[in-house]
Amino acid sequence: MRYLASALIVLATSLWLGGLVGLFICALAVFKISGLDHEAAGKATSAMFVAFGRCQLAVAALALIGAFLAYVSRRGTLNVVLFLLFALATLGAVCVNMLIIPRLEELRLAGKIKSPEFATWHHHSAHVMMGMTLILLIAAMLIPAVCRQIAAPPKPASPGAG
C-alpha cells in the first residue's frame, strides 16, 4: 500500500501542478503569440479552463487518496500536512469549478467580457489558481520526505513497552 500511496502522490501532484503551469503558459500564448483576435482567444482559453477544471477534480481526488493511504501506512506529521495541502488546493479547485468558471462563462456568453463584473471574477480566478499553484508547489517539495517516511521499514517496538 505504501508504494501505491507514493505513486498516487507523485503522479497526481505532477499532473496537477504541471497542468496549472501549462494552463498559464498556454493561456498567455493564445493571447500574446497566436495572433487571434481577443474574442477568439477568449473562446479558446475558456475551453481550456473548462476542460482543465474538470480534469483537476479527478487528479485532486487521486492526490487526496494517495495522501490518505500514506497516512494509513505510516502515521506522521508530514503525511497530515501533505493531506491538508491537497485538501486546501482541492477546495480551490472546487471553488473554481462551481463558482468562478460558471460565472465567467455566463458573462462571456452574454458578451460582457469588458464589464467590471467580468474583471472582478477574472481577478478572483487568477488569485485562486495562483494560490493553488503555490500550495501544490509546497506539497511537491514535501513529497520526497513523505515518500522516504512511508517507504522506511517500521520501527521495532521498544522492549519496555507492553
Image (cartoon, grey):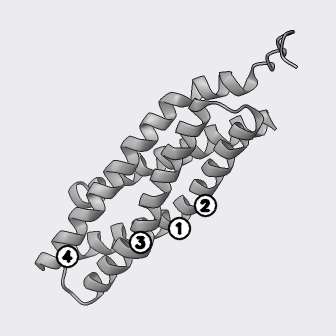
Q: How many marks?
A: 4
Mark closer to the observer (3, 1): 1
Q: Quadrant of the C terminus?
A: top right
Amino acid type indicated by mark 1: Arg
Q: Is residue 64 above or below residue 143?
A: below
Which residue, given by chain and number where applicable, does mark 3 sit on?
47
Q: Earlier in the sequence, mark 3 or mark 1?
A: 3
Q: Earlier in the sequence, mark 2 or mark 3?
A: 3
Which residue, given by chain and number where applicable, does mark 4 sit on?
118
Which residue, given by chain and number where applicable, does mark 1 sit on?
54
Q: Is residue 25 above or below residue 116?
A: above
Q: Is residue 108 above or below residue 41?
A: below
Give me the disc on residue 58.
Answer: 2
User: Dot 3 surroundings within 10 Å: few (below 14), some, or many (20 or more)?
Assistant: few
Give me the disc on residue 125.
Answer: none
11 displayed left or right of 140: right
Q: Nearer the viewer, residue 113 or 43?
A: 113
Is label 4 in contact with label 3 (beta carbons under 8 Å)?
A: no
Q: Dividing the picture into quarters, in which one does residue 67 lie? A: top right
Q: Residue at x 43, y 35 (%)?
A: 138
C-alpha distance separating marks 1 and 4: 21 Å
Amino acid type indicated by mark 3: Ala
C-alpha distance separating marks 3 and 1: 11 Å
